[in-house]
Structure formats: structure tokens, C-alpha cells
Image (tube, grey):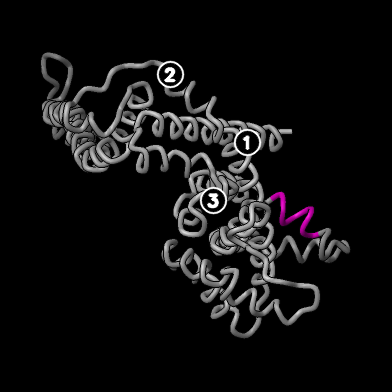
Amino acid sequence: MASSAASGAVVGAMPAPTAGGVSSPARPRGRLAAARRRRRPSTRRRQRVVELLFLAPAVIYLLLFFGYPIVKNVVMGFQHYTSATFFTGVAPWVGLDNYSAVIHSDVFSKALVNTLLFTVGSIAGQFTIGLALAVYFQRNFPLSGVLRSLLLLPWLIPLIVSSAIWRWILDQDNGVLNRALSGLPLVGHPGWLTSTSLALVAVILVNIWIGIPFNMTILYGGLQDIPEELYEAAALDGATGWRAFRHITWPLLRPVVNVVLVLGVVYTLKVLDIILGLTRGGPANATQTIATQSYHLSFTEFDFGHGAALGNILIAISLIFAMLYLRASRRAVTE
């Protein structure tokens, strides 16, 4: 009797179903859920608009200061664009004539070979010395932080200042280097910047000196991400020194190496101020590169069409190298 009375009381307390079979409190909940669903698309759109507004300044900056100059340089490579164009606004379309003229010029083959030698020599020296220093500074020893900071100085000094200092050091008559070498037997006064056989070597050595800090810093950061436990486990198996470097350090450092080499090659291909500050492309075009020749055509002879054509060739060389190297590296990793 008591249980039946209690169940009746509970049944009596429950809300009566409506004609649709849904209890009356369920209606507000359904309306609230539907309102939330309607709000979600509008909230997402609002967030998307805010994200685009934050990105807009960066996109506008890239288009104005990177996109427009590149497009303008590409267009100028197909025009007869000279100093008179700035006054008349007339730049006749010449098609591939600019490219044909610069490729068949007497300087282009020499500049292309110098660019190749300058790039390969600089990258080989910078990367090898930078990697050796990064591995060396991986050990903890007193004043290691101070020494790493001092090695960054060549990277921090303005390039035009560096070239002026090295021009004084390498001077044939009054340079510090030749004065130091004069005390050695069978050593005269080499013309580091005036000899056609030594000028390119001297410029490469100066560029190596400038690029070592960049390579060392990036590679040192990559070495810090390699777990120390791997070296400890390898040491238990007898893999230390060169074997540890070959089987642990180099494979794990390869992604960082790819970035360093690609950026280094792209940067070295367009090096201009160091060569201009040291030799201005001489003597007898011994240090003339595609970058310096493009500068010479544009801002010495004021033939901007030919200069832009050489600049576009340099951009194409950089893009081709980057794509081929990254594809080869990706294939080596997958294999």
C-alpha cells in the first residue's frame, strides 16, 4: 500500500506530455540548442575575419616590398630600360634580347665560373669550420659562452666595415698580413687583391670568415636538440668519437644541415658588398660574379634591362639549386 501510494505520487508529480509527445520543459532546451547551432557559424566567421585582419598587414608588406620588386625586375628583364626611361617613361619591349646580350657577352662566362668557385669555396669553408666549432663548443668548459659570443663578432659587424678592414689587412705594400709574412724566408709581398690568381682566393677567405658564425650558431642549436641519452647508450656499445658522430650526430642533424646549406648557397650567390669593397670585381674581372656584373650594368652603365636580366638568371639559379638539393635530401631520408 505504501509503495503504490509513493509511485502514484511520483507519477502525479511528473509533467504531463503535450500533444506532440514531448514534455514542456524539453522545448526551451531544444530552442537553446538550436540557437547555439545558429550562433556557431557566425562566431567562426567572426574569428576568421579577425585572423585575416591580423594577417593583412604582413601580406601587404610582403606584396609591396618583396612581391612588387621581384615582378618589376622580371618585367624589366624583357624591356630596354635605361636611365632615359625615368624621364620619358618609355621602355620598349625587347623580349629575350637582354638575356641573349648578357649571356653572349665576354664577361658572362668568367662571371659564371667565378660565381661557382666563390659559392662552392665559401660554403665548404664556412660549413666545415662552423660544424667543427659547433661540435667543439658542445662540450662544457670554462669561458665557452664568452668564446661563442666573441665568434659572433664577424657576423655582427657591417659588411662594408668588414671589407674595409680586410682591404687594409690584405694591402700589398702596407698590409698587416704581408708585414707579418715578410719575416719568413722565401715569402715576398703577394698582391692578395691585385693578383689575378690570388684575388678570388682572398675574397673567398674573407667571405668564409664572415659566414662561420652563422653556420656555427645554427648547427650548435641543432646539436642541443639531440638527446644526450643516445650518446650514453652508444658509448655502452663502444660507439664513441667519430662513430658516434657518423651514426648519431650526422643523421639527426641532417634537417638542420639542409637549412644551413640552402640558406648559405642562396646568400652566397648574391654576395655583393664584400666583393665591391675588396676588389670591385677586379683585377681584370678576376673576382667578377653574376651579382657584381648585374650591379655594374645597372648602376654604372645604367643599363637596367641587362642588369635585371642577369639578376633574373641569378634568381633562377638559386631556385633550381634549392629545389634539386631539397628533393635529393628528401629522397635520401626516405631511402
Residue furthest to the bottom: 142
Marks 1 and 2, how far apart at CA: 31 Å
> Residue 325's mark?
1
Q: Nearer the viewer, residue 172 or 289?
A: 172
Q: Quadrant of residue 248?
A: bottom right
User: What type of secondary structure mainly makes up the magenta span?
Assistant: helix
Are dots 1 and 3 in contact, CB under 8 Å? no
Give, as a single range, the part of the protein colored magenta. 244-251
The mark lying in front, picked from 1 and 3, is 3
Residue 257 visible in the current orientation: yes
Q: In the shown orientation, is residue 35 left or right of residue 317? A: left
**Is residue 322 within the magenta segment?**
no
> Residue under circle 3?
282
Q: Is residue 47 left or right of residue 122?
A: left
Give the image location of residue 234, x and y in percent. Answer: 81, 61
Q: Which of label 2 and label 3 is nearer to you?
A: 3
Vertical placement of 94 versus 299: above or below?
above
> What residue sits 39% from the left and 32% below the top?
308
Mark before the other along the chain sequence, 1 or 3: 3
Residue topped by disc 2 = 97
Res. 11 visible in picture: no
**Where is residue 39 drawn, in percent x and y?**
16, 31
Image vertical order of residue 226 relative to residue 118, above or below = below
Q: Given the current orientation, which residue lies at the most extreme right position?
A: 238
Q: Earlier in the sequence, mark 2 or mark 3?
A: 2
**Residue 130 occupies which quadrant of the picture?**
bottom right
Q: Amino acid at mark 2?
A: Asp
Q: Quadrant of the N terminus?
A: top left
